[in-house]
Image (spheres, grey):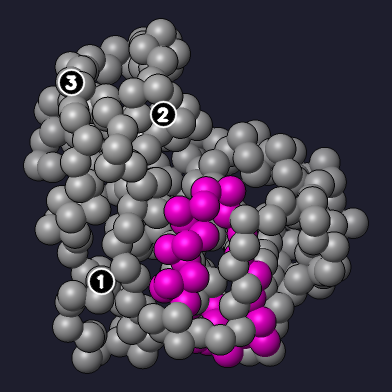
Amino acid sequence: MTNNKKCIFADMNTIKLKFEQLNEEQSDLVAALLSNENIEGFEHVENDFFAYFTEINFDKKIVDDLLAPFQFKYTQELIAPQNWNESWEKNFEPIRLNEQVGVRAHFHPPFNNVKYDIEITPKMSFGTGHHATTQLMLAYGCETDFTNKTVFDFGCGTGVLAIFASLKQAKYVVGIDDDPWSVENALENCARNHCNHITISIDDIETFHEPFDIILANINLNILIQYKNHLKKLLNPQGRLFLSGLMTSDKEQILAQYADIGFTLVSQKQQKEWIALELILTV
C-alpha cells in the first residue's frame, strides 16, 4: 500500500526515513504523527514503512520529539533527485470499495463491476482511495444523495471525493487545496472523468461565502479545528458536514470543538484506528 500526500519534486534532495517491522496500524500512527510536519510522502512496503521529506523541510528534532512517546525508531537516508512519479506509478494498485465505486489509474483497465469507475492519475496528491480516511469518505459518498446538491471539498487532494459527488449528480462542486500540485492534479482528474461541474482552485477558504448543501473535509485534526467556524459559515443550515483525517483518539476533542459551535454527531464510520464523522447543525 502506498499513501502519498504531495509530490516530491525531482530537483530536490529527499530525506527518507525507514521504520522497520511496522504493521499497518503502527504505520498509520506514524503517518498521523508526521502529517502536519511538511511531510511529502508515505510508503508501506511489506513490514517496512517509509516517510519522505524534502531536505529543506526536514527537522529531525521535531520528528524525534513526536515519535519519542511511542518509541518508534528509524534510520535516515539522503536521496538525490529522481523521478518519484515514475517510481510511484509502478506500485499503484486499483481499489474497489464496493459494488458502487472503484478507483484506478489511467493505465489500469476499467472496472466492469462497479457503478462509478473513477480514474485518478497518480501524481502523489493525497486521495488515491488507498488510505482508510479516503475509503471512509467514499463509503459515506455511497450512502449520500448528491442529486442537485452543492458540494464543497475542503482539501481536495486528487479530487477523488469531488469527482464522486459530481458523478452522483451534484449540481456543482467546489474543491480547494493549498498545494499547487494537488490543484493541478485534481483539474486533470476532473477532466479525465468528464466532470464539467467542478471548480478546483487554490483559493483560501475565507474567500468563499455562498453556503453549500454538503461539505467534505478529509484533512487532519488541527486544520479541522482551525477552520471550524469557516466550515460552519459555508454549510447550509440543513446541510451535512463530513469530517475525516481523524483517529479514534481525536474523536472526543473534535466533537467537543464542533459541539461548541452548534454541531451534533449523526453517524460515525471507522476503519482500524481511523474515523469519519457525519455532523449536522442543530443550533
> Which segment is the magenta one?
164-190
Q: Quadrant of the C terminus?
A: bottom right
Q: Earlier in the sequence, mark 2 or mark 1?
A: 2
Local secondary structure at mark 3: strand
Which disc, if any, is residue 105?
Answer: 1
**Residue 237 x %, y %:** 85, 68
Q: Which residue is mark 2?
A: 34
Local secondary structure at mark 1: loop
Residue 146: quadrant of the picture: bottom right
Q: Earlier in the sequence, mark 3 or mark 2?
A: 2
Front residue of 30 and 39: 39
Q: State left or right for residue 5 relative to residue 209.
A: left
Front residue of 102 and 126: 126
The residue at the point 12 percent across, 28 percent down is 21
* Pointers 3 and 2 in contact (C-beta within 8 Å): no
* Pointers 2 and 1 in contact (C-beta within 8 Å): no
Q: Is residue 275 above or below residue 137?
A: above
**Residue 93 x %, y %:** 18, 64
* Magenta span includes 11: no
Q: Nearer the viewer, mark 2 or mark 1?
A: 1
The amino acid type, in three-letter code, at marker 3 is Glu
The residue at the point 29 percent across, 62 percent down is 122
- Residue 276 can be seen, yes or no: no
Q: Which residue is most to the right?
A: 283
Front residue of 109 and 67: 109
| Marks 2 and 1, how far apart at CA | 27 Å
| Marks 3 and 2, how far apart at CA | 17 Å
**Residue 16 x %, y %:** 23, 27
Front residue of 178 and 242: 178
Q: Which residue is mark 3?
A: 77
